[in-house]
Image: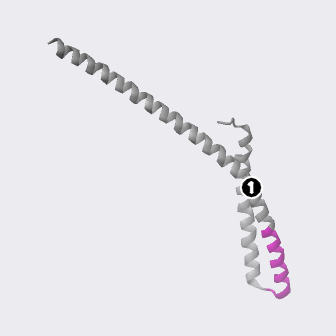
Amino acid sequence: MKLLKKQRKEGEIMKKTMLAVTFLSLFFMALTFNAGMLYAQSAAEEHAGEGVAHAKEGITHVKEAIKHLEESLKADKNPHAKEAIEHAKAAIKHAEEAITHAEAVSGKAGTKKNY
C-alpha cells in the first residue's frame, strides 16, 4: 500500500514537472518567434529604403521615356504614342504612391531599437 501511494505521489510530481517544462518550452518558443519577427521587420524596413531609391530612379527613366514618346507623337502623329504616354503617366503616379508608403516604412527604421 505504501509503495502504491509513493508511486502515485511521484506520478503527480512528474505530471506537474512535465506541465512546467511544457509551459517553459512554449514560453521560450514564443520569445524566440517574437524576436525573429522583430528582426525580420527591421530588415524589411531597411530594404524599403533601398526600394525607394530604386523606384525614384525608375520614375526618372519613365519620365525620360515620356519625353521621347511626346517627340515621336509630334513628329508623326502616332496615336499609340499618345496612349503609351497616358499609361506611363499613370505608372508614375502609382510608383510615387508606392514611394510615399515605402518612405513611411523606412523612416521608422531609425526609430527602432536593435533587437
Relative to the observer, which residue lies in front, 28 or 65?
Answer: 28
Quadrant hosting residue 88? bottom right
Give the answer, above or below, for where 17 lies relative to 78.
above
Residue for point 71% across, 66% down: 91
Left or right for 60, reference 108: right
Return the residue found at the far front.
Answer: 3
- Of the 4 image quadrants, the one containing the C terminus is top right
Can residue 108 be seen here? The reply is no
Relative to the observer, which residue lies in front, 32 or 48?
Answer: 32
Identify which amino acid the numbered label 1 is placed on. Val
Decide whether residue 75 is among the magenta residues: yes
Left or right for 42, reference 29: right
Query: How far from the left and from the top, in percent, is residue 68?
Result: 83, 77
Q: How is the image coloured?
A: one colour
Return the residue found at the far bottom.
Answer: 76
SS assignment at label 1:
helix
The residue where tag 1 is placed is 52
Query: How far from the left and from the top, in percent, is residue 39?
Result: 62, 42
Give the answer, above or below, for where 4 lies relative to 66.
above
Query: How far from the left and from the top, in percent, is residue 19?
Result: 36, 26
- Of the 4 image quadrants, the one containing the N terminus is top left
Can residue 90 be seen here? The reply is yes
Quadrant hosting residue 72? bottom right
The boundaries of the magenta stretch are: 61-77
Residue for point 39% across, 30% down: 22
Residue for point 40% across, 27% down: 21
Left or right for 1, reference 79: left
Residue for point 71% across, 42% down: 109
- Local packing at callout 1 (Cα closer than 10 Å; few below 14, some 14-19, many 20+) is many
